[in-house]
Image (cartoon, helix red, strand yellow):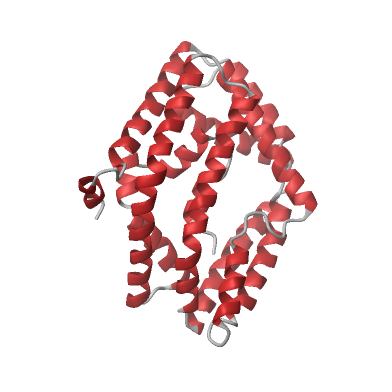
Amino acid sequence: MPSCLKRALKPITAVVAILVLTTGCTVQLAYMNLDRLVIRWVDDKVDLNAEQKRLVRRALDDNLSWHCADHLPQYVAMLNSLGDDLNDDRIDMATMVSYSEQVTQFGQELIEVSIEPATQLLASLDERQVEHLFLSFEESNEELLERLGEADVEKIQTERAERMVRRLSRFMGRLNRQQLARLSQWSVDYQPIDGHQLAYAHQWQEQLKQALALRHNQPDEFAQSIAVLFEPTRGWEDSYRQAVEANQALTLEALADVLNVATDRQKDHLMDKLGGYASDFDALSCSAPAQLAALD
């Protein structure tokens, strides 16, 4: 099952990934409430019973202990490195690709440690919960259908650019005309992928339905089927993969261009943000038992 962490760590850039993860609250507040947020998200999808909530909480406790001891120090190092690159004007396409690959790796590692608890949870679902889960999928599919039904291409492009401007403005402050024009061009060049996403969603959901049919009588085959569903990009058509890769390259290039024409004030604002996140992640790192206990 795709997790909220997987969505939060999509490989756009380190900056945007951290932003999505922490939108609306401080890093420390978001992290220390992550278990509650995840349980609420899962509960909304399948309507957990008491034992299932305990299963999810135990898995989250184990994963968060690993994450704050292993990943958070790496986040600190990455953010500090990004800050140095910004300060020394070393931002180019290769630099952005490097940070994107780091974020992708973090996301993949988070997915891998989620496979076993997700398999256990899915195996415990009753038929009513399975029905609830697929109803939630249908709602998501309807949202994609609505976007596909939007015929005004210029409106879609404008809204896409505006979303990116809002995201970057939270880090850099008000963008200038040159930066706005660059993001506008990025949005025009961006390839629509909603149709690909909807087709893949239907395919993935059907495969999950088939796997769930095995959960009671063929547990080994069920576990193998679920593990396969967690493989990133598995089952993507070539056209979907090419569009995603092209859009990622376009996005990284546009962000590099925006950063390269940043004013001193924008750089200072961004450096302060990155430094604040690095400090928060450093404080949350579970290198000491006392820090780990603070997350309980």
Q: Name the quadrant containing residue 38.
A: bottom left
- Residue furthest toward the bottom? 217
Give the camera-side residue of 176 and 97.
97
What percent of the width, then of the height, locates residue 4?
48, 55
Q: Is residue 280 left or right of residue 136?
A: left
Residue that sits furthest to the top in the current view: 264
Give coordinates of residue 152: x percent, y percent: 72, 43
For image coordinates 76% across by 45% down, the residue present is 242
Near-viewer residue (292 or 247): 292
Q: In this rendering, would 119 be left or right of 235?
A: left
- Outermost residue toward the right in this view: 239
> Can residue 9 be seen from the camera position used here?
no
Q: How many marks?
A: 0
Which part of the image, by quadrant, shows the C terminus? Answer: bottom left
From what the image shows, is residue 40 above or below residue 90? below
Please, is residue 150 above or below residue 201 in the view?
A: above
Q: Is residue 191 left or right of residue 225?
A: right
Residue 155, image quadrant: top right
One can see residue 128 in this view: yes
Q: Is residue 186 left or right of residue 17?
A: right
Query: Where residue 182 sits: x, y (%)?
Result: 65, 23
For the N terminus, the quadrant is bottom right
- Which residue is the extreme one toward the left? 290
Which quadrant of the figure has residue 270?
Answer: top left
Closest to the observer: 36 or 238?
238
* Residue for point 61% across, 78% down: 221
Q: Position of residue 238 (x, y in %)?
A: 79, 51
Say which residue appears at 67% left-offset and 41% top-offset. 156
